[in-house]
Image (cartoon, grey):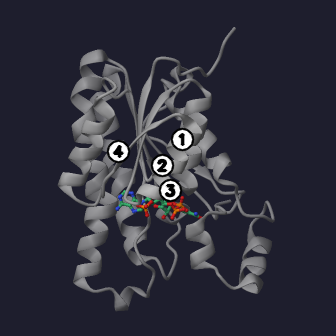
């Protein structure tokens, strides 16, 4: 019996040049999918795409034009079967310090990007009666972090939007889920927790006593993309070393 293969499936992975997005793209490629990577910086994209034998396009998914460019690039290979909606996170700060501009930018980058990407890929998925929409969110959805107010709010919105969308399309072979990483060793984590002593203390508070590896989150994303995960929809899969317990 062959399990978890994605041969012949086409995936669009945004925020795919580094970190969790790249790890998801690696896992999807390993299972046989044909991947298109999207991010803003061309250099990292080129390197990642060369490693994976993937297509790539430079685009900012925080804008409508960027989303359109991302989807068009992926569609050049054929209809998109799997969408992984991911990007960088909004900048940190206390809730009382957030400007209206920061809220607007977070809304565009984290929430509307997922809505726009899903809207763009959904018609073809419904027509072929097979599709996977997966957004990378954060453990902060249910457990807000004091200094990530925009992220906390927007990722909760993404989670509930995909749960609602899941209701609409569940009978059409399309699943909608989120993968919520805990502390994962990527550039973003290193930037947010640059002090080694603080990073050490933080790891001690995680039941697994370590940060997660991007590949551990990427594998969860790839699992939700498989045919075997076809009866899982509207769910949040936490990959957090036990933090949420
Ligand atoms: N790492 C963690 O511990 C952790 C925990 C919980 C949640 N998360 C969330 O998981 C997501 C991925 O995190 P990560 O740690 O993998 O981040 P990362 O290492 O900073 O990678 C982010 C990726 O997204 C791309 N990107 C950023 N802004 C973009 C935009 N506007 N349009 C298109 N691509 C964009 C980046 O490339 P360019 O900059 O070149 O565009 C890069 O490829 C983030 O939303 C983060 O908040 C991470």
**In the figure, is residue 107 to the left or right of 179?**
left
Of the numbered discs 3 and 1, the one sitting upstream in the chain is: 3
Foreground tag (4 vs 3): 3
Residue 179 visible in the snapshot: no
> Which residue is tagged 4?
162
Q: Give the SS element for disc 2.
A: helix
| Residue position marked by numbered label 1 in the rendering | 50
Residue 201 drawn at (x, y percent): 77, 80
Residue occupying image coordinates x 60% and y 36%: 27
Q: Is ligand 1 less than 8 Å from the beta carbon at label 3?
A: yes
Q: Are marks 3 and 1 in contact (CB under 8 Å)?
A: no
Helix, strand or loop for disc 3: helix
The single residue placed furthest to the bottom in the displayed view is 97
Are the residues flagged by discs 1 and 2 in contact, CB closer than 8 Å? Answer: yes
- Disc number lying in front (2 or 4): 2
> At x 63% / y 79%, what residue is drawn?
193
Q: Is residue 135 above or below residue 10?
A: below
Determine whether the residue tagged by mark 4 lies in a helix, strand or loop: helix
Residue 73 position within the rendered picture, expressed as x and y whole percent measured from the top left = 29, 38
On screen, residue 177 above or below 33: below
Q: Which residue is mark 2?
A: 46
| Label 4 or label 3, whichever comes before in sequence order | 3
Q: Sequence-wise, which precedes: disc 2 or disc 4?
A: 2
Give the quarter of the image for residue 110. bottom left
Contact between labelled residues 2 and 3, with CB atoms less than 8 Å apart: yes
- Residue 94 visible (yes or no): yes
| Label 4: how many Cα within 10 Å (few below 14, some 14–19, many 20+) | many
Compare residues 110 and 10 and report the one nearer the observer. Answer: 10
Residue 168 sits in quarter: top left
Task: Note whether ligand 1 is within 8 Å of mark 1.
Answer: no
Crowding at dot 2, Cα within 10 Å, few <14 / some 14-19 / many 20+, comes out as some
How far separated are the C-alphas under marks 3 and 2?
A: 5 Å
């Amino acid at each position: 019996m062959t399990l978890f293969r994605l041969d012949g499936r086409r995936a669009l992975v945004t925020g795919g040049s580094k970190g969790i997005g790249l790890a998801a793209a690696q896992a999807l490629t390993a299972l046989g999918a044909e991947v298109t990577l999207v991010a803003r910086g061309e250099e990292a994209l080129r390197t990642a795409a060369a490693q994976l034998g993937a297509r790539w396009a430079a685009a900012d998914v925080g804008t409508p034009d960027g989303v359109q460019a991302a989807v068009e690039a992926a569609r050049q290979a054929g209809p998109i079967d799997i969408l992984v909606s991911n990007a960088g996170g909004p900048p940190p700060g206390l809730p009382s310090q957030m400007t209206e501009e920061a809220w607007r930018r977070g809304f565009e980058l984290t929430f509307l990007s997922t809505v726009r990407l899903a809207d763009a890929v959904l018609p073809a998925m419904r027509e072929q009666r097979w599709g996977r929409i997966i957004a990378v969110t954060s453990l902060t959805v249910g457990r807000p972090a004091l200094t990530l107010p925009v992220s906390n709010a927007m990722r909760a919105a993404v989670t509930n939007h995909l749960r609602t969308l899941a209701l609409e399309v569940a009978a059409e072979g399309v699943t909608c889920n989120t993968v919520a990483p805990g502390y994962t060793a990527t550039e973003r984590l290193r930037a947010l927790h640059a002090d080694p002593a603080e990073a050490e203390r933080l790891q001690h508070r995680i039941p697994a006593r370590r940060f997660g590896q991007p590949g551990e989150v990427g594998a969860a994303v790839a699992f939700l993309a498989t045919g075997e995960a076809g009866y899982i929809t509207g769910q949040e899969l936490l990959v957090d070393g036990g933090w949420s317990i």
